[in-house]
């Protein structure tokens, strides 16, 4: 049919299903708010849980790093792109999280793609939580391994997938805190079950790191579990971007041989690795920020419960309000915008059909009055 027609058809289908996605230019002068088309809104859709994207020390470190190291790595880590700031930050992460090694990636998406592609072979199996992030599921379905998904957060469902192994290895994949539901995985049970069958567990803790656990060490630390592969990302609570895998000495060496994203892609800018060290210190010393975030979560949940809102059971910064139908979710988000609150409607295919929702995210940067305004807006918008 030709490229042109294929593209036009795909777009027409998206529009017909009302799933056409568009970006909007948004401007951020601080963490609490954003401006779109010259109008200012309270921002309840960012993942900047501790407000570190605007931290003065982190900004200063990035500037200083740029002066010192330039703005680009100039090559992949295997050539000349691996510098002292990368090495220092990897070491700090490994020490902090109690692993022998950490390897940096330019994003969480890249880390998940690279690791799954490098680890899995034909005859292997990936058992993934049904709600695992797109970067994990996409990598799994591209890999030569067999992908099976198990019911969300149900170790019993995972148990049924193991069968007397007919060769190959098994990787179980889950998240620490789920990005669209805000709930936490039962990591102890998943890890024990996986180990019992000689498999390895990969935990993507993009939304737990910095937020939960002592010093913000994340979901695994909090639940006292050490998965063989732990992914942490820096685009959420750390306020910047990038990611790392925490693993054993030998696994790190293996990934350095076979993870193609590490070999054929320009390394993270050294200035960023330098700034990330300052962000890490802010996270480690961030008990006040985490307490403020927890207070906001409590305020929101108490207010929402009192108002009879259908919020999902989540004790994290991600507070989803289940709506159901896509159009209803879009309309509710629109009414909230009219009331000055920016909240994103999340709909299929990002979440299962019939579970469209508002994904409300809270930050330590929000003030009590911001939460009250959101609750009032939700109350008014719902009553309409
Ligand atoms: C955001 C996210 C990613 C992707 O991380 P980036 O650094 O933004 O590419 C991966 N996994 C999960 C669970 C996420 O929420």
Image: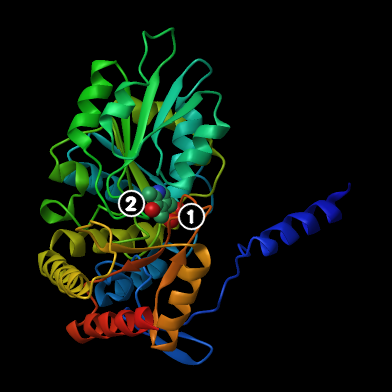
Closer-to-camera residue (381/295):
381
Q: Which residue is mark 1?
A: 73
**Residue in the image at 44% along x and 34% along y:** 115
Does the closest atom of ligand 1 sit within 8 Å of the Cβ of label 2? yes
Residue 83 in view (yes/no): no
Residue visible at 41% across and 39% down in the picture: 130
Is label 1 in a helix, a strand or a loop? loop
Instruction: Name the foreground residue: 332 vs 88.
Output: 332
Instruction: Name which residue lies at 69% across and 62% down.
Output: 16
Asked whether the residues under the numbered discs 1 and 2 touch, taking CB atoms below 8 Å apart as contact, a structural biologist would say no
Task: Single out the residue that lies furthest toward the right.
Answer: 1
> Where does the C terminus fall, quadrant-wise?
bottom left
Mark 2 residue crowding within 10 angstroms, few (<14) / some (14–19) / many (20+): many
Is 4 placed above or below 164 here?
below
How far is the residue under mark 1 from the one under mark 2? 24 Å
Which of disc 2 and disc 1 is earlier in sequence? 1
The label shown at residue 81 is: none
- Is 76 left, or right, of 155 in this rendering? right
Q: Would you say residue 169 is visible in this rendering?
A: yes
Residue underneath mark 2 = 206
Task: Find residue 337 and report its horizontal and vertical position in percent.
Answer: 43, 83
User: Which secondary structure, mark 2?
Assistant: loop
Residue 21 sits in quarter:
bottom right
Q: How many marks?
A: 2
Q: Residue furthest bottom?
A: 38
Image location (x, y in percent) of residue 210? 22, 57
Q: Is residue 159 left or right of residue 281?
A: right
Q: Which mark is in front, 1 or 2?
A: 2
From this view, report whether residue 16 is shown above or below residue 303.
Answer: above
Q: Where in the figure is residue 144, as x and y percent of width and height?
A: 56, 24
């Amino acid at each position: 049919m030709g490229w042109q027609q294929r593209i036009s058809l795909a777009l027409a289908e998206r529009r017909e299903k009302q799933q056409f996605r568009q970006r909007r230019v948004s401007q951020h002068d601080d963490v609490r708010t954003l401006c779109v088309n010259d109008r200012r809104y309270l921002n309840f859709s960012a993942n900047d849980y501790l407000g570190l994207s605007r931290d003065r020390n982190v900004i200063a470190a990035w500037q200083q790093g740029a002066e010192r190291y330039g703005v680009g790595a100039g090559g992949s880590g295997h050539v000349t792109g691996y510098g002292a700031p990368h090495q220092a930050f990897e070491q700090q992460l490994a020490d902090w999280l109690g692993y022998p090694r950490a390897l940096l990636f330019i994003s969480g998406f890249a880390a998940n793609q690279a690791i799954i592609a490098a680890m899995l072979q034909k005859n292997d199996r990936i058992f993934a939580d049904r709600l695992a992030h797109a970067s994990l599921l996409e990598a799994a379905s591209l890999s030569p391994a067999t992908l099976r998904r198990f019911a969300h957060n149900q170790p019993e469902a995972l148990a049924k997938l193991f069968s007397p192994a007919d060769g190959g290895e098994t990787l179980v994949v889950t998240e620490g805190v789920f990005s669209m539901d805000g709930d936490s995985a039962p990591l102890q049970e998943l890890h024990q079950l996986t180990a019992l069958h000689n498999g390895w567990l990969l935990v993507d803790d993009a939304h737990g790191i910095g937020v939960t656990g002592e010093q913000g060490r994340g979901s695994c630390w909090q639940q006292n579990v050490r998965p063989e592969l732990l992914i942490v990302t820096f685009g959420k609570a750390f306020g910047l971007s990038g990611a790392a895998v925490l693993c054993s000495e030998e696994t790190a060496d293996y990934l350095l041989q076979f993870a193609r994203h590490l070999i054929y892609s320009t390394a993270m800018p050294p200035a960023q690795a330098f700034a990330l060290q300052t962000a890490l210190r802010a996270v480690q010393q961030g008990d006040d920020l985490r307490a403020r975030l927890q207070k906001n979560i409590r305020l929101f949940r108490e207010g929402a419960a009192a108002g009879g809102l259908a919020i999902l059971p989540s004790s994290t910064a991600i507070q989803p309000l289940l709506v159901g139908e896509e159009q209803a979710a879009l309309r509710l988000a629109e009414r909230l915008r009219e009331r000055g609150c920016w909240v994103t409607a999340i709909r299929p295919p990002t979440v299962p059909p019939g579970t469209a929702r508002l994904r409300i995210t809270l930050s330590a940067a929000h003030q009590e009055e911001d939460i009250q305004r959101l609750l009032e807006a939700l109350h008014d918008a719902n009553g309409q």
